Amino acid sequence: MSAHWAWIDAHRADLSDWCATIFEYGETAWREYRSAAWYVDRLRREGFDVEEGSGGMPTAFCAHWSNGPGPTILMYAEYDGIPGQCQAASTREEPRTGLTTRAGGHTDPHSALGIGALGALLATKAAMQHHGIPGTLRFTGEPAEKVRGSKPIHAAAGYYDGLDAALSFHPYYMDPLCNTVRWDTHCGAAFSMVYRFRCDAPHLWQGGRLTSSRPTSSARRSGDPHPTPPIPQAHSDVRAPGAQDALVQMYQSARLTRDAMLPHRGGWSISEAILAAGQATADNLPETRADLQYMIRTSTVEEAETVTARLDTLAEAAAASTGCSWEKIWVSKSRPGLANHAIAQVTWDALQAAGPPRWSEAAHRLMAEVQANATGEATTYAPNTALETLTDPQEAEAILRRDLPPSQSNSTSDDYTEMTWHAPTARLYIARPTLTGGPYPPWTMNALGGLPACIDPTILTAARTLSQAALRLLQDDEARGAASDEFHRRTSENPIPPLCDYAPPIDLDWPEYADTPRGRIWT
């Protein structure tokens, strides 16, 4: 057995335990403190030099290990979950201990994504040491992927410069991308921003002076038609509508408008979330601040810019009508992805050598139990045979293109695409445990991502495949050269420089855990 696969087999239990640890943390965007600290500690134990807080992001990192002059290969971890998806590693719907279902949890799951990549990294390192293979391994910690957070910032700050190849892995999330590699149609652009409304001067909303419900006696004597009330901002005074009203106007106007917006051709989307609202100090005072977040998923940067301009117009109108000021706080400007057939072929060859994941009878019994608990009745469980089948990348591409307009070059959204502008990049998908039939409630997928017998095959197959591809790229000058030539050709045809011109949005009111006298809570 090859040295890298021998390392993986010897550390199967470790990889399983590590994934369970990150799954249990269940931290969300920009607040993955324990998860990032775990990775930093683990990488240092394995001999990597680690920069914490890379790119000005407290929960990001960049790790290096070198075995002498040679090619540099990048892999990475993601470890953010999603609010409102707290699920235990259980066959029934229940939150993790001490929490409610409203807390964070892993859905994709990024817990398996990160540990699959880490397993590949450490297996590659072991083989490089065993065989004396020169080169450098770079491993980045990428927080806040769910809001397309860290990678545009890392890209602009130079963390992807000087690479010979980048390997991206994700547990499969849509047919036909199951046990395959993206070929032509990579993920698209994504813009995300928060519109912040402030009502800092409510006394100016009516042209400079507030009017009371009736004049005071002194005002009547003086004849002043707009007297100043004896108690400023008295209960009887009119007041500015406030920041929450501005948010509601923007929210409603955008929903009415977006169906006519350009990205709704080809399955593109605009989604919104109220990040913060209210902050009123009393029932007769206007809310001073409200934050409304948008995520725009499009095929091109130009489409994203068009939608953003429309949203800016709506924000301006909402602020003007409610006595507020407004500002736009960028969360992400992510570029669409570039294909690279040469490195995709290398990765597909590696996947064929590794073979598809295989699930044990014990895993099937757990899946059947999840299915029965989800339906509330005894049902016949049928294993999903597609999970153990490889799909040729060009066949997957043809299936994917069936539902897309011919002019659409990119589909879905994930910010690994930033790496494709800095190095030849492969996008690998490995099957994750899923049930046949349905539909099933979301907790079932989340639970299957936390049950070790169910998720471990995904992690092990990803680690085997990525380490196989990395070792070939380190040693095969011809394959590496072909990928480099294609990369330079594609990036020169329509160059897009990094778009990030904003600070990491780490100070927004992102949901998070807090340690209190009442214990660890979700807020």
Image: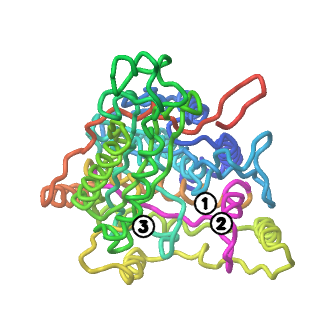
Left or right, 16 with respect to 490, comes to: right
Left or right, 87 with respect to 476, comes to: right
Q: Mark 3 points at which residue?
A: 181
Vertical position of residue 422 compared to residue 183: above or below? above
The quarter of the displayed image where residue 108 is located = bottom right
Residue type marked 2: Pro
Q: Residue furthest front?
A: 221
The answer to if 432 sits in the magenta stretch is yes
Mark 3: few/some/many CA within 10 Å (<14, 14-19, 20+): many
State the CA–CA distance, disc 2 to disc 1: 8 Å
* Residue contact at pointers 1 and 3, CB within 8 angstroms: no
Residue 481: % across, % down: 23, 56
Disc number for residue 458? 1
Q: Which residue is drawn at 67% across and 44% down?
A: 103
Q: Name the residue under label 2.
A: 433
Residue type marked 1: Thr
